[in-house]
Amino acid sequence: MGRPRVLDGQLLFLIALLALLLGVAWWRGGPELAGEGLAGGARMLLRFGLLIGVSLLAAGVAEVLVPRDWIGGALGEESGLRGILIGTAAGVATPAGPFVSMPIAAVMLRSGAALGPVVAFVTGWSLLALHRLVAFEVPILGLRFALFRWSLCLVLPVLAGLAARALSRN
């Protein structure tokens, strides 16, 4: 595993976007508005930067602990529909936000999981995560609506995983 490039196209794009936004802020409100924007960004960096950093470190440790042959067997190219269902179930059961679920997906990919199960995992987490259903949807939107929406989305992670599997083989 070579050393990852830090200064890549994504980072250069974000630096250019930051420069553009700073220029607009300076033009609209001078150094005070630009400074206020940078201070707000620094507060978010302190809050979420540490959270993202710790979750990525945990993902790196998890990557070396989870046996690659198990990931390859359960979620690899030959896992078929079973792997997609496992990915979906794991996404539904992942009780956290993107700071946890995205590093898990990255570990899955780097450990030999095929695209289908990982797409099913991310889609299952995005649409069907049980913690959101119980903590937010049912109390705020009501049981009938929450279960109606959840049941309508139930097949989508599997379909997305199957589509990813079919498209990645071409």
Image (cartoon, helix red, strand yellow):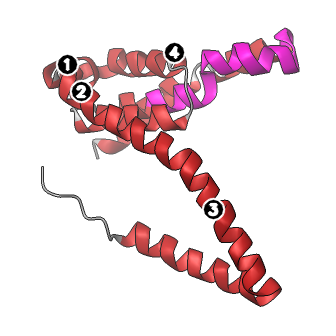
Q: How far apart are marks 2 and 1 (CA)?
A: 6 Å
Give the CA separation, mark 2 to mark 3. Answer: 39 Å
Mark positioned earlier in the residue sequence (2 or 3): 3
What residue is at 51 percent from the left and 15 percent from the top? 93
Amino acid of disc 2: Gly
Q: What element carries label 4?
A: helix
Q: Do the residues labelled 2 and 3 touch (CB within 8 Å)?
A: no
Decide: few, some or many residues near mark 4? Use Cα within 10 Å; few <14, some 14-19, many ≥20. some
Left or right of 96 on screen, residue 12: left
* Distance from Cα at disc 4 to Cα at disc 2: 20 Å
Which residue type carries mark 1? Gly
Q: Which residue is found at the position 52% from the left and 79% from the top? A: 16
The magenta span reads 120-144
| C-alpha distance separating marks 4 and 3 | 32 Å
Tell me the amino acid under the disc marked 3.
Gly
Secondary structure under badge 1?
helix
Give the mark nearest the N terminus, 4 or 3: 3
> Which residue in the structure is indicated by mark 2?
76
CA gap between label 4 and label 1 equals 20 Å
Mark 4 residue type? Ala
Q: Residue furthest top?
A: 143
The residue that label 1 is drawn on is 73
Residue 146 % position (x, y): 78, 17
Mark 4 vs mark 1: in front: 4
* Residue 53 position in % (x across, y down): 41, 44
Q: In this view, does 144 lie to the left or right of 110?
A: right
Q: Residue 41 carries which label?
A: 3
Left or right of residue 14: residue 36: right
Q: Between 133 and 79, which is closer to the camera in this rendering?
A: 133
